């Protein structure tokens, strides 16, 4: 790399570090939108978790769906942490826990059925 390219890169990195960080001292409408969206998408998994627990079967839920969804939610959570986006982080953390509970129940109920 020549000196001009290196200097420009370093200036860009310095500029990025001087950008203001998100602060949440006041709740603007966009932040409310993020919280409401996070609550809706997180609550959407609750009926499936309850139904799976009550029926003691998760045969109709595919492993592919659960693992791809868990990976996606995990990546969104990392994005929220890096971007310091509280609604994204919290919603995906809770959704990840719900998906993990579905994975656990599916494994447990499928494993139990095979032993019978």
Image (cartoon, helix red, strand yellow):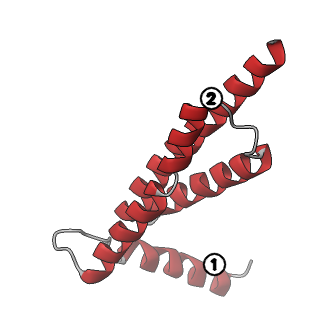
Would residue 36 be visible to someone looking at this image? Answer: yes
Would residue 81 be visible to someone looking at this image? Answer: no
Q: Which residue appears at 69% of the width and 47% of the height? A: 66
Q: Is residue 76 left or right of residue 33?
A: right
Please identify the quadrant where the C terminus is shown. top right
Q: Please identify the quarter of the rendering in which residue 37 is found.
A: bottom left
Q: Which residue appears at 81% of the width and 12% of the height? A: 115
**Contact flag, marks 1 and 2 (Cβ < 8 Å):** no
Residue under label 1, please give it. Answer: 6
For mark 1, give the secondary structure: helix
Q: Which residue appears at 76% of the width and 38% of the height? A: 59
Residue under label 2, please give it. Answer: 56
**Does 44 appear above or below 63?**
below
Q: Which residue appears at 58% of the width and 84% of the height? A: 8
Residue extending furthest toward the front: 55
Foreground residue, 42 or 80? 42
Name the spot of residue 95 as percent of width and height, x first.
50, 50
Mark 1 against mark 2, which lies toward the viewer?
2
Name the spot of residue 13 as percent of width and height, x first.
51, 74
Q: Is residue 7 left or right of residue 5?
A: left
For mark 2, give the secondary structure: loop
Q: How far is disc 1 from disc 2 in space, using C-alphas?
A: 60 Å
Residue extending furthest toward the left: 26
How packed mark 2 is, by other alpha carbons closer than 10 Å (few <14, some 14-19, many 20 or more), is some
Q: Please identify the quarter of the rendering in which residue 111 is found.
A: top right
Q: Please identify the quarter of the rendering in which residue 6 is found.
A: bottom right
């Amino acid at each position: 790399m020549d000196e001009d390219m290196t200097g420009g890169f370093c200036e860009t990195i310095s500029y990025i570090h001087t950008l203001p960080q998100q602060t949440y001292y006041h709740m603007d409408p966009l932040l409310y939108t993020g919280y409401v969206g996070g609550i809706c998408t997180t609550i959407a998994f609750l009926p499936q978790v309850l139904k799976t627990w009550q029926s003691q079967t998760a045969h109709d839920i595919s492993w592919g769906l659960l693992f791809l969804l868990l990976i996606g939610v995990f990546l969104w959570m990392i994005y929220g942490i890096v971007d310091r986006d509280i609604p994204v982080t919290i919603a995906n953390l809770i959704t990840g826990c719900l998906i993990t509970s579905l994975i656990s129940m599916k494994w447990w109920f499928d494993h139990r059925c095979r032993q019978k």
